[in-house]
Image (cartoon, grey):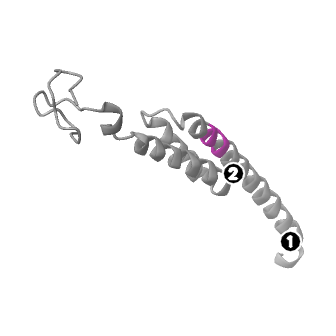
Amino acid sequence: MFCKNCGKEIPDESKYCTFCGSPVNPEATQKPSSSSSNDVDVVSILAIVFSFLVPPLGCLIGAIGLSNKNKSGHSLCLASTIVGGILSLAIAAFLIVWLVFFFEWSTNYFSPFIS
């Protein structure tokens, strides 16, 4: 077998040329860089799941995923940030309305007993 870079003869089982050091089969020697994209995919999936279960946490995880330089899960992180924010605001509004009505009801209900 001959090196594609320098043209010298090298052993058939070589992964690198012994003369110039270049890889004999660059496609086989390159490691797939899917680990970083898998990390972003995991972050984006976690963000989506948590945006429905615990909206503020999903919003935070989505924002962390958006700050990552790898763009593979960018749209899911953006969606989870928006959904988490909207659900967080909806839950906060519901709690405020519930507390107002609860205190109004409790003061009307217990007022004959208090005075």
- Extreme residue in the left direction: 19
- Extreme residue in the bottom direction: 113
Residue 47 in magenta stretch:
no
Q: Quadrant of residue 80?
A: top right
Q: Residue at x 69, y 42 (%)?
A: 86
Does residue 101 appear to the left or right of 95 in the view shown?
right
Numbered disc in front, either 2 or 1? 2
The local crowd at label 2, few if under 14, some if 14 to 19, many if 20 or more residues have their Cα within 10 Å, is few
Q: Nearer the viewer, residue 30 or 82?
A: 30
Q: Amino acid at mark 1?
A: Ser
- Residue designated by label 2: 92
Assign a secondary structure to mark 1: helix
Residue 83 in magenta stretch:
yes
Q: Nearer the viewer, residue 16 or 65?
A: 16
**Residues drawn in magenta:** 79-84
Query: Can you give x and y, in whole percent of width and height, for residue 67 in the image?
Result: 45, 36
Query: Can you give x and y, in whole percent of width and height, for residue 60 in the image?
Result: 53, 47
The local crowd at label 1, few if under 14, some if 14 to 19, many if 20 or more residues have their Cα within 10 Å, is few
Q: Residue at x 58, y 45 (%)?
A: 59
Q: Residue at x 55, y 45 (%)?
A: 44
Q: Amino acid at mark 2?
A: Ala
Query: Can you give x and y, in whole percent of width and height, for residue 82 in the image?
Result: 64, 38
Magenta segment, prevailing SS (helix, strand or loop): helix
Q: Nearer the viewer, residue 32 or 95?
A: 32
- Residue designated by label 1: 111
